[in-house]
């Protein structure tokens, strides 16, 4: 048997502690698979005294993760601190500069500096593995980089944020308002203390940008992702979606179009009978469309200590086995800059919910503005506030729900601006894009 692979772990939070425990528990099985043991020889964390319920044995303690990254008796630096800046960035750079392989679960770091770090790794022949950075236990990084290495990916879409999927599931199943479900997610420890990163879509956008680079051979460009969160979704939208045969999910979508690469994160209507629509609660899922293949969908736990540690450990095992693949599936210097498809030219169907003034001519005025933009209506339903389809009249404003055939973002925005100027609606229209699946 070869010498043990010596790892240094920076960050002993939920994931770090779960990793140390899993390495101890799986010691023999891992050694049998790699013909080499994995040994935790050094660690670093904020508090030395905290009881984490794990046995750190004789692992050396470092207060400074950068010093740990430089430890000559460490073969692989495992970064589980998080954050795009220091100390995570400085420590990963120090490890790669010293020729050590790095395993990280840090999506923010990769979204901001992934290509530069990949170049550093390739220069020294080190590995930079990050399966855990996207959708935790779901092996989507390896699926794109290795499993589909011979395929041309045309689109990928998925549920990349468990907090949002939990909130939408509760809103749909229990008919609860957004704010109540968010509180529940916080109480259960799913959402961050400041949950805006989750619910405004930024967490999903970082993950999507990493997957898009792997799928399309482009540079990671989180700034090119169009982002909308779920805070404007109301139970009325979920009820209407249900009746129309859809569910609402916060999807991240990346696809090739003739105008360039489209990357977007927003609430999305998906057909209720699709694989992605069945994914409830904190679970994540991703579907990949590749030429010549039926859609491939992976579903599983996308967050939490055990799920994330499982992906981190598989990356460490790859290194122990001597597997090296360019971090983004091809030499980082050959990744192309993203040619960003403008969101205004996005094409697809739309769900539109308006509060229309209940008086003669309103429906005609709305239909005219849509027709001016060549938007064709697939269905239109008017409801009185009690929820029954109208026929009957109601005082004041009534919700009108429209589903359009495929059109463009630009046409929808122009039509709704004109409807607003006509003063036939109150408040802001709700717009949800429909994804074909
Ligand atoms: N906050 C993330 C989520 C966890 O809710 O999915 C890991 O990225």
Image (spheres, rainbow, N blue to C red):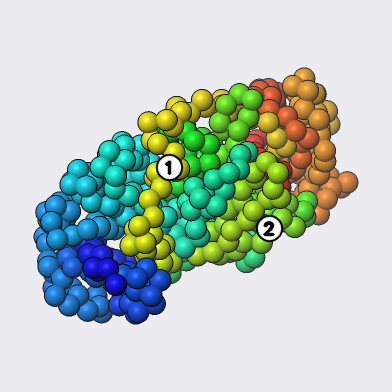
* Above-or-below relation of 217 to 59: above
Q: Which mark is residue 234?
A: none
Q: Which residue is mark 2?
A: 275
Instruction: Say which residue appears at 35% left-offset and 79% top-offset.
Output: 28
* Residues packed near mark 2 inside 10 Å, few (<14), some (14 to 19) or many (20 plus): some
Dot 1 lies on which element?
A: loop
Q: Position of residue 388 (x, y in %)?
A: 81, 54
Q: Toward which corner of the image does residue 309 lie, by quadrant?
A: bottom left
User: Closer to the N terminus: mark 1 or mark 2?
Assistant: 2
Q: Is residue 118 visible?
A: yes
Q: Nearer the viewer, residue 197 or 276?
A: 276
* Above-or-below relation of 113 to 371: below
Instruction: Say which residue appears at 47% left-offset and 39% top-offset.
Output: 213
Q: Position of residue 263 (x, y in %)?
A: 54, 36
Instruction: Say which residue appears at 33% left-offset and 62% top-offset.
Output: 320
91 relative position to 344: left or right: left
Front tag of 1 and 2: 1
Whether label 1 touches label 2, CB < 8 Å:
no
Q: Position of residue 402 (x, y in %)?
A: 76, 39
Q: Nearer the viewer, residue 322 or 413?
A: 322
Q: Which residue is mark 1?
A: 328
Q: Toward which corner of the image does residue 123 lie, by quadrant?
A: top left
Specify the farthest residue to the right: 391
Dot 2 lies on which element?
A: loop
Specify the farthest residue to the front: 1
* Residues packed near mark 1 inside 10 Å, few (<14), some (14 to 19) or many (20 plus): many
Q: Nearer the viewer, residue 90 or 151?
A: 151
Instruction: Say which residue appears at 64% left-offset and 53% top-offset.
Output: 296
Distance Cα–Cα, label 1 vs label 2: 27 Å
Tell me the quadrant of the picture where the N terminus can be found: bottom left
């Amino acid at each position: 048997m070869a010498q043990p692979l010596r790892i240094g772990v920076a960050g002993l939070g939920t994931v770090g502690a779960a990793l140390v425990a899993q390495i101890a528990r799986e010691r023999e099985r891992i050694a049998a698979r790699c013909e080499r043991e994995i040994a935790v020889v050094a660690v670093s964390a904020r508090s030395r005294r905290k009881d984490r319920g794990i046995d750190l044995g004789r692992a050396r303690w470092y207060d400074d993760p950068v010093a740990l990254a430089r430890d000559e008796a460490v073969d692989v630096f495992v970064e589980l601190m998080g954050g795009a800046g220091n100390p995570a960035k400085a420590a990963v750079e120090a490890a790669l500069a010293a020729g050590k392989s790095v395993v990280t679960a840090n999506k923010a770091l990769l979204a901001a500096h992934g290509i530069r770090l990949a170049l550093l790794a390739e220069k020294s022949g080190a590995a930079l593995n990050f399966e855990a950075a996207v959708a935790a236990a779901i092996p989507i990084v390896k699926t794109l980089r290795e499993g589909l290495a011979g395929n041309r990916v045309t689109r990928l879409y998925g549920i990349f944020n468990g907090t949002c999927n939990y909130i939408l599931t509760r809103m749909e199943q229990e008919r609860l308002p957004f704010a109540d479900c968010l509180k529940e997610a916080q109480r259960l420890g799913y959402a961050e203390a400041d949950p805006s990163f989750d619910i405004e879509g930024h967490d999903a956008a970082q993950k999507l940008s990493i997957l898009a680079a792997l799928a399309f051979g482009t540079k990671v460009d989180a700034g090119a992702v169009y982002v909308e969160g779920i805070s404007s979704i109301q139970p009325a939208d979920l009820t209407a979606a249900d009746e129309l045969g859809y569910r609402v999910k916060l999807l991240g979508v990346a696809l090739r179009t003739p105008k360039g690469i489209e990357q977007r994160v927003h609430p999305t209507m998906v057909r209720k009978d699709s694989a992605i629509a069945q994914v409830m609660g904190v679970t994540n899922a991703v579907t990949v469309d590749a030429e010549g293949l039926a859609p491939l969908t992976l579903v599983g736990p996308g967050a939490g200590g055990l799920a994330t540690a499982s992906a981190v450990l598989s990356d460490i095992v790859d290194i122990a086995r001597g597997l090296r693949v360019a971090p983004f599936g091809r030499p980082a210097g050959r990744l192309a800059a993203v040619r960003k498809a403008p969101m205004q030219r996005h094409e697809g169907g739309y769900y539109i919910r308006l509060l229309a003034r209940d008086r003669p001519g309103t429906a005609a005025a709305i239909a005219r503005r849509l027709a001016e933009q060549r938007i064709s209506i697939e269905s239109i339903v008017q409801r009185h506030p009690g929820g029954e389809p109208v026929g009957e009249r109601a005082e004041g404003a009534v919700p009108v729900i429209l589903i359009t055939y495929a059109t463009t973002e630009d046409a929808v925005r122009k039509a709704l601006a004109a409807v607003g100027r006509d003063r036939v609606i109150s408040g802001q229209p709700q717009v949800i894009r429909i994804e074909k699946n």
